[in-house]
Image (cartoon, rainbow, N blue to C red):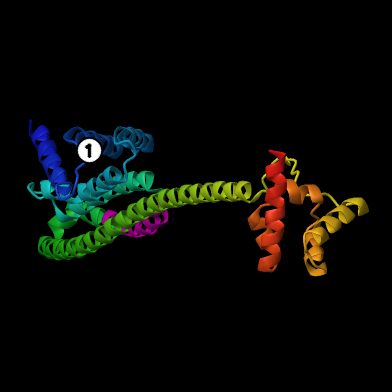
Amino acid sequence: MQGAGQCGALDSELEETTLGAEEPKLKWEHITTLIASLREFVRSTDRKIIATTLSKLKLELDFDSHGISQVQVVLFGFQDAVNKVLRNHNIKPHWMFALDSIIRKAVQAAITILVPELRPHFSLASESDTADQDDLEAEDDHEEQPSSQTVQRPHVVLDDAVATSGVSTLSSTVSHDSQSAHRSLTVQLGRMKIETNRLLEELVQKEKELQALLHQAIEEKDQEIKHLKLKSQPIDIPGLPVCHLNSPGTNTEDSELTEWLRENGADEDTISRFLAEDYSLVDVLYYVTRDDLKCLRLRGGVLCTLWKAITDFRDKQT
């Protein structure tokens, strides 16, 4: 019952670490599962246990970057949560340090599985942990000295024990403060890594949207160019026979027109204007209009005379 109570307290401590999130993704079951895998790792040091649990959590969170970030926050808060629970028990400082080292290694294993980029960083931290562990073992050897020496020099051993305990407590306090600062920086680094990945994903998405807009603009421009090409092409209209426009006239047609014009009072300048337009006598008598004559810029009197002759001819034909 006591173990269950401690586990519940630990769950509560870890749950508080996710309350500050804008949109909590982790549920109570997720945190409980994560704690269970860390506990099994402490017993067996089998990384597959944590790897399997983290894979399931990622799948349940649908690989959401905010959810994975909260998993990382819970992992970094696990060590502090355990220390709060352990402080409620009468445990010697050097054993607290040993337990803290074990928990820290479990957290590091989980973090390096969740964020492989942090593995070199934790490798450097593990080297310093090894040195601290050597000091701890030396301290344990010192405490396990034969009891005969205690009987022979009781006062000296007592003084040494007090001094050793004081030094151990001071060392543990300094080490714990250093580890807390180290964990704080590591948490910040992990969050920055996840935020960087999220920003990269957002950048890729924006680039895809930009490419889609560019493709759409190019297609629209292609359509406009095609329409302009269609509009600029010459319209092929089958030629209609125009009777009043004479083909290059023969000498006979020219002479007939010239003779008729002279009979109706036209001078040489007027005749040359008709010939320049390739009119034939048939064109003049049947098809030419008054406006056509005006286009020749004839003198007013000549124009009226010729137009009267044309209308008289047409009236006789009807």
Q: Whole-percent x and y of residue 66? A: 28, 46
The N terminus - image quarter: top left
Q: Secondary structure at mark 1?
A: helix
Horizontally, is 214 left or right of 74 in the view?
right
Q: Does the rendering let one see residue 169? A: yes
> Residue 28's quadrant in the figure?
top left
Q: Whole-percent x and y of residue 70? A: 24, 46
Q: Whole-percent x and y of residue 17? A: 16, 48
Which is more toward the observer, 264 or 13? 264
For disc 1, the marked residue is: 35
Q: Whole-percent x and y of residue 161? A: 14, 61
Q: Residue at the location (85% across, 58% down)?
A: 258
Which is more toward the observer, 280 or 138? 280
Q: Residues within 10 Å of mark 1 (few under 14, many from 20)?
A: many
Is 173 located above or below residue 110 in the figure? below
Which is more toward the observer, 185 or 194? 194
The C terminus - image quarter: top right
Q: Residue at the location (14% across, 39% down)?
A: 11
Question: Bounds of the magenta span?
Answer: 117-137
Horizontally, is 86 left or right of 198 in the view?
left
> Residue 12's quadrant in the figure?
top left
Three-letter residue code for mark 1: Ile
Is 179 located above or below residue 32 in the figure? below
Horizontally, is 48 left or right of 1 in the view?
right
Q: Residue at the location (8% across, 35% down)?
A: 5
